[in-house]
Image: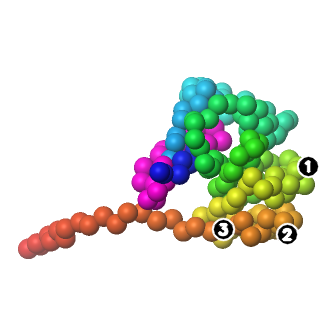
Amino acid sequence: MNKKIYVEPTWKMHSSYRGQFLNPPEGYEYLIKKTVSENTFKTFSKMSFSYSVLTQLERMVPIYIIKPYFERFKKIPEGVDLTYSIGHLVFRKQPWVVELETVTNLVGGSQQFLKRYKVFIENMLSSSYCKKIIFFNDSGMKSVSQSLDCSKFEQKMVKINFTIHRKISSKITIKRE
């Protein structure tokens, strides 16, 4: 039986992720469910004023913490073994991993909110529910190490190199005269 991994983006799923999750490792199955917030954000992001509204809102409240906090009540697919979070904390009492580009992903890019919620973030990442903190580059891992006290969750931090399936192509020879 496959392990079921629920993939949960912060807002809408970037197209590059959809390709990443098409070929899960053997023994795993990715569950990607379009959410109400993803559909709403997709519609909202098509409006010209949307990003300026979101930017103003992000300056006043930590929406990257508030949104996942309220999503702890949302229904996720049955039989999920793990949630794969793309750039946000998970507040449900179940195992999860988080993929981070930088530490400020967790607070919407705000250094102000990072300072204010530093201890809270450290506690969430050191929680027994947080299983791994995944990075795809050294600079992301360094941003966490320099901004947070990682002593309680350092063993969870891991860098994974990007990989792609090898595509075999035939050589094309061009004759020039």
Question: What residue is shown at x 15% (from left), y 71% (from top)?
Answer: 173
Would residue 20 be counted in the magenta stretch?
Answer: yes
Q: Which residue is mark 1?
A: 116
In what element is the residue under mark 3? strand
The tag earlier along the polypeptide, 3 or 2, is 2
Can the viewer see residue 138?
yes
Q: Nearer the viewer, residue 75 or 49?
A: 75
Alpha carbon of mark 1 to alpha carbon of mark 2: how far?
Answer: 19 Å
Q: Which quarter of the rendering shows the C terminus? A: bottom left
Highlighted magenta segment, given as a residue range: 7-29
Q: Which residue is mark 3?
A: 158
Alpha carbon of mark 3 to alpha carbon of mark 1: how far?
Answer: 25 Å
Which of pointers 1 and 2 indicates the residue nearer the eye? Answer: 2
Which of pointers 3 and 1 indicates the residue nearer the eye? Answer: 3
Would residue 133 be counted in the magenta stretch?
Answer: no
Q: Which residue is mark 2?
A: 151
The tag earlier along the polypeptide, 3 or 1, is 1
